Amino acid sequence: MIKSYKDLIVWQKSFELAIEIYRLANLFPKTETYGLVSQIKKCAISIPSNIAEGFARKHRKEYARFISISFGSGAELETQLLLFKKLELAIREEFFKSEKLLNEIMKMLNVMLQKLYC
């Protein structure tokens, strides 16, 4: 039985993703510290934060809204990671774990949204 947002696999994976993004951010050029690096950190932490907040609201409609916000943050993060790769600001292999986790999370959030809106 799920008693806390911390019991949700999607929250656990998104929390792991946030840690991975913070690790990855240290590899980017210092010139990007206040630009894209700052933005990807905000997006990454937004995903588990909104899952947690939505879960705590205890109302299905509000929960769906916060899951939707998490999904949007995931799409934003995906776009920013694509930009980093295109600009070759880090080694492509460094992105693999983050991209894999993000892909899993987006699929999970999509399923959650479909179930919450039914």
Image (cartoon, rainbow, N blue to C red):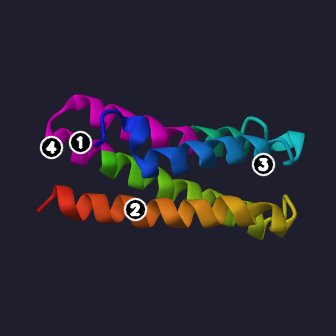
- Label 4 CA crowd tier, 10 Å (few <14, some 14–19, many 20+): few
Assign a secondary structure to mark 4. Answer: helix
In the picture of the structure, the residue carrying the numbered disc 1 is 63
At numbered mark 2, what does the secondary structure look like: helix, strand or loop?
helix
**Rendered position, 107 above or below 18:** below
User: In the drawing, does residue 74 fall left or right of residue 98?
Assistant: left
Look at the image and say whether residue 67 sits in the magenta stretch: no
Q: Amino acid at mark 1?
A: Tyr
Q: Looking at the picture, how far across and down is residue 19, in whole percent?
A: 67, 41
Q: Which residue is mark 2?
A: 108
Q: Kindly check if marks 4 and 1 are in contact, taking CB atoms under 8 A apart as contact.
A: yes
For badge 2, the amino acid type reads Met
As measured in the structure, the alpha-carbon distance from the residue carrying label 4 to the one carrying label 1 is 5 Å
Horizontal side of residue 3 vs 48, given as left or right: left
Q: CA distance from mark 3 to mark 1?
A: 30 Å
Residues rendered magenta in the picture? 43-66
Name of the residue lying farthest toward the front: 1
Q: Which residue is mark 3?
A: 24
Q: Amino acid at mark 3?
A: Leu
Where does the C terminus fall, quadrant-wise?
bottom left
- Residue 97 in which image quadrant: bottom right
Q: Secondary structure at mark 3?
A: helix
- Residue 49, how many percent across, how many down? 45, 35
Badge 4 is on which residue? 60
